[in-house]
Image: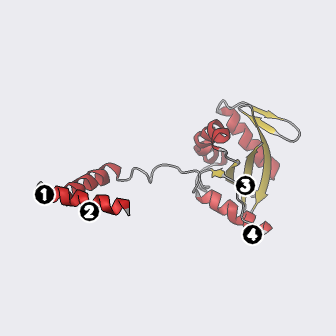
Amino acid sequence: MEVAFLHKYLFLLANNFKFNLFHSIDRVLKKSAKRDKNRFSLMHDPTTTLSLKRYRALINQSTGKITEKKLWGSYEWNSNRSIENNIEKSVPSFIHFCKCAQIEGLDGYVFEISASDNTNIEVLNNLLDVLSIHKLKVVRSSNLICIQQIPFLVELYKNKDGLQYIVFLTQ
């Protein structure tokens, strides 16, 4: 209600001074639209990626439960690229995840990889090799993988379309 009253009195005040408020608002909106054209469609939002949606659908279908975990997802798989190139595209997002996961209370990061001919372990090893190339310190132990001194529990999933999901869960 208060916002509506504010708008009403702002409009009345502008009319009193013979000021065209709607003209000014249109000008600002046009300037913003011109500035922001294609600005946000080029950015990667790791919370709304297609890869994350497909992973959640797989988990929902296999367990019957909707996962409530706060997850980030890699870029969706592009079949025209190699495994390494697909992973490399998501490395900056994963590095950002490593920096802010604890602060923001994030539960994990999901990599989507198409490697139907490879086992889950081969795909995981390939992923860790690519991360190591990008100067991320990777330490493997029996039940955890530490990346940048952050311990992760790793879960591996595969859907019927040959897409594999490697999930790094924060501890």
Kindly indicate whether the residue at mark 2 contacts the one at mark 1 (C-beta within 8 angstroms). Answer: no
Quadrant containing the C terminus is top right
Mark 2 neighbour density, 10 Å: few (under 14) some (14–19) many (20 or more): few
The location of residue 108, given as percent across then percent down, is 70, 48
Left or right of 138? Residue 6 is left
State whether residue 143 is above or below residue 41. Answer: above
Residue that badge 1 annotates: 16
Q: Which residue corresponds to mark 2?
A: 8
Amino acid at pointer 3 = Tyr
Q: Quadrant of residue 170?
A: top right
Q: Earlier in the sequence, mark 1 or mark 4?
A: 1
Task: Tell me which residue sits at (71%, 32%) in the image.
Answer: 148
- Which residue is at the front of the view, 63 or 85? 63
Q: Of the two numbered discs 2 and 3 on the same chain, state the one appearing first in sequence.
A: 2
Read off the residue under disc 3. Answer: 165
What type is the residue that disc 1 sits on?
A: Asn
Whether label 4 touches label 2, CB < 8 Å: no
Which kind of residue does numbered mark 4 sit on? Gln
Report how far apart the C-alphas of labels 1 and 4 lie in the structure. 62 Å
Instruction: Report crowding for label 3: few under 14, some 14 to 19, many 20 or more residues within 10 A (C-alpha).
Output: many
* Tag nearer the camera, 1 or 3: 1
Query: Distance between the Cα atoms at labels 1 and 3?
Result: 62 Å
Mark 2: amino acid: Lys
Query: Alpha-carbon neighbours of circle 4 within 10 Å: few (<14), some, or many (≥20)?
Result: few
Query: Which of the 4 image quarters holds residue 65?
Result: bottom right
Q: Earlier in the sequence, mark 1 or mark 2?
A: 2
